[in-house]
Image (tube, helix red, strand yellow):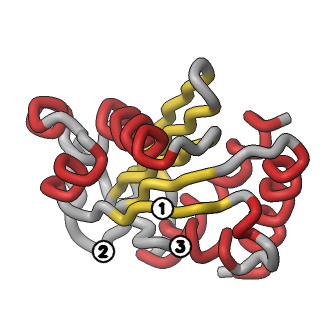
Amino acid sequence: MDLKNLETLSANLGALLQKKKMFITAAESCTGGLLSQSIVSVPGSSAWFGNSFITYSNISKHKVLGVSKETLKSFGAVSEEVVREMVIGAINETKANLGIAISGIAGPGGGSAERPVGTVCLAWKLNKDLEKQETFLFEGNRNEVRYQTVVKALEEAIVLMN
């Protein structure tokens, strides 16, 4: 796990956000704040990062971010439908321009045939229009899955900002 790489990606994203006078927010589940940690490791990140949410349980996803109980019941916490509602909730709460939401199964347990360990759903939302959700299957141990998730989250956010 190369935390310096996360800091570099975060700094690159931050430069884009700062140039455009925009803010980012995050709604994290399986990464437990690793995305936010990588962002605040960048000196001066308070110019483009105000806050984030760690909503590990379904109850917190619902109560803090407004994810529908019906969505959670119908699709499960690890779904593109849930991360879409998470990112919208995070942006609604913070008024940030860019939001990233993450929910997944980092392991070592918790997987199933349908959603094996390493399955992670990500969502990005930029301003009012642009939305993207995608599901990934990462390999490795718990920390490797979490790290790969944050790398992908940052890389795709940079692409959206360009």
| Residue 136 seen anywhere in this rendered image of the structure | no
> For mark 3, does the 10 Å Cα neighbourhood hold few (<14), some (14 to 19), or many (20 or more) residues?
many
Left or right of 52 on screen, residue 84: left
Disc assigned to residue 34:
3
Residue 4, position as x, y percentages in the image: 78, 80
Q: Secondary structure at mark 3?
A: helix
Q: Which residue is mark 2?
A: 108
Above or below 35: residue 22? above
Q: Which residue is mark 1?
A: 52
Q: Nearer the viewer, mark 3 or mark 1?
A: 1
Q: CA distance from mark 2 to mark 3?
A: 18 Å
> For mark 1, does the 10 Å Cα neighbourhood hold few (<14), some (14 to 19), or many (20 or more) residues?
many
Residue 11, position as x, y percentages in the image: 82, 65
Q: CA distance from mark 2 to mark 1?
A: 26 Å
Q: Nearer the viewer, mark 2 or mark 3?
A: 3
Above or below 72: residue 132? above
Left or right of 110 on screen, residue 40: right
Left or right of 77 on screen, residue 93: right
Residue at the top extreme, as displayed: 129
Of the residues shown, which amino acid type is indicated by label 1?
Ser
Q: Earlier in the sequence, mark 2 or mark 1?
A: 1
Image quarter of the C terminus = top right
Left or right of 70 on screen, residue 105: right
Residue 40, position as x, y percentages in the image: 66, 75
Q: Earlier in the sequence, mark 3 or mark 1?
A: 3
Above or below 5: residue 150? above
Q: CA distance from mark 3 to mark 1?
A: 11 Å
| Residue 122 seen anywhere in this rendered image of the structure | yes
Residue at the image point whose x is 58% and y is 44% from the top:
96
Task: Tell how many labels.
Answer: 3
Above or below 142: residue 91? above
Of the residues shown, which amino acid type is indicated by label 3?
Leu
